[in-house]
Image: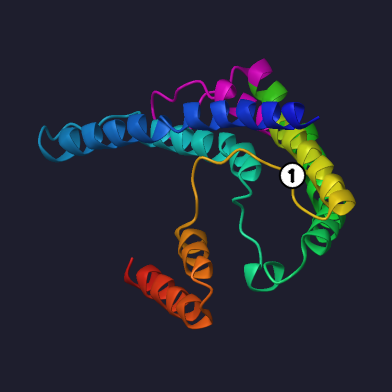
């Protein structure tokens, strides 16, 4: 079971990291547009569409990867104080109450959205030479399927946690700086060090 769960994590990690390269392409496209606009005095007609689609692709296709790393925003000031079983029960309720209905609606509406765009061979209307955009819209239902698959994995993890009293292993490749600082402070078994770590982390965030 664990190998299956981690296999889905790896799939979404591969997809997320692959589409992360959109950042590099986006940077190059915008740099080229700025150069053409202000140096050559000849702005491109495609930069807006390309930047919109690249950012949208990155945003959508990284969603399941972020979920696999437990990286989405939550009310941690409450959640972190709960026992693992309480966390898992809360997550389980919220998955069925909000997550799955929303994801199923995304897949259904996204497929119809893509299908209509494909049938019309839709092009962007934001520029004179608008590029074809149905391949971009195809990412909507694909994103929904990946999020649905990862959501099922997270539900299984909740059930395992409720049974065993602790969260099962998940893949990790990045860590929040806050978590690292707090873990380092906790190893010192010093409450004052933990408070200082929290204050230092808050100061660091404020300076960004």
105 shown above or below 202: above
Residue 112 visible somewhere in the drawing? no
For the point 59% across and 22% down, the residue is 134
In the rendered view of the protein, which quadrant contains the N terminus? Answer: top right
For label 1, the SS is loop
Q: How is the image coloured?
A: rainbow
Residue 9 drawn at (x, y percent):
65, 32
116 shown above or below 163: above
Residue 182 drawn at (x, y percent):
51, 67
Residue beneath label 1, please? Answer: 168
Q: Nearer the viewer, residue 28 or 188?
A: 188
Report the magenta residues as a range.
118-143
For the point 68% across and 31% down, the residue is 6
Residue 14 drawn at (x, y percent):
55, 26
Residue 50 figure quarter: top left
Does residue 43 belong to the magenta stretch? no
Residue 208 figure quarter: bottom left
Q: Residues within 10 Å of mark 1 (few under 14, many from 20)?
A: some
For the point 43% across and 79% down, the residue is 196
């Amino acid at each position: 079971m664990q190998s299956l769960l981690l296999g889905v994590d790896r799939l979404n990690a591969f997809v997320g990291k692959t589409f992360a390269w959109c950042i590099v392409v986006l940077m190059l496209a915008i740099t080229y547009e700025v150069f053409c606009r202000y140096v050559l005095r000849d702005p491109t007609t495609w930069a807006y569409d390309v930047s919109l689609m690249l950012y949208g692709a990155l945003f959508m296709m990284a969603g399941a990867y972020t979920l696999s790393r437990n990286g989405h925003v939550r009310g941690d000031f409450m959640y972190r104080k709960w026992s693992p079983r309480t966390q898992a029960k809360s997550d389980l309720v919220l998955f069925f109450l909000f997550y799955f209905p929303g994801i199923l609606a995304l897949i259904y509406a996204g497929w119809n959205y893509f299908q209509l765009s494909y049938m019309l061979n839709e092009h962007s209307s934001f520029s004179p030479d608008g590029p074809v955009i149905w391949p971009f819209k195809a990412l909507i239902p694909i994103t929904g399927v990946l999020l649905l698959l990862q959501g099922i994995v997270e539900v299984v993890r909740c059930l395992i946690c409720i049974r065993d009293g602790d969260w099962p292993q998940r893949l990790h490749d990045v860590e929040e700086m806050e978590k690292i600082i707090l873990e380092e402070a906790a190893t010192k078994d010093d409450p004052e060090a933990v408070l200082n770590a929290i204050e230092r982390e808050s100061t660091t965030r404020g300076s960004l």
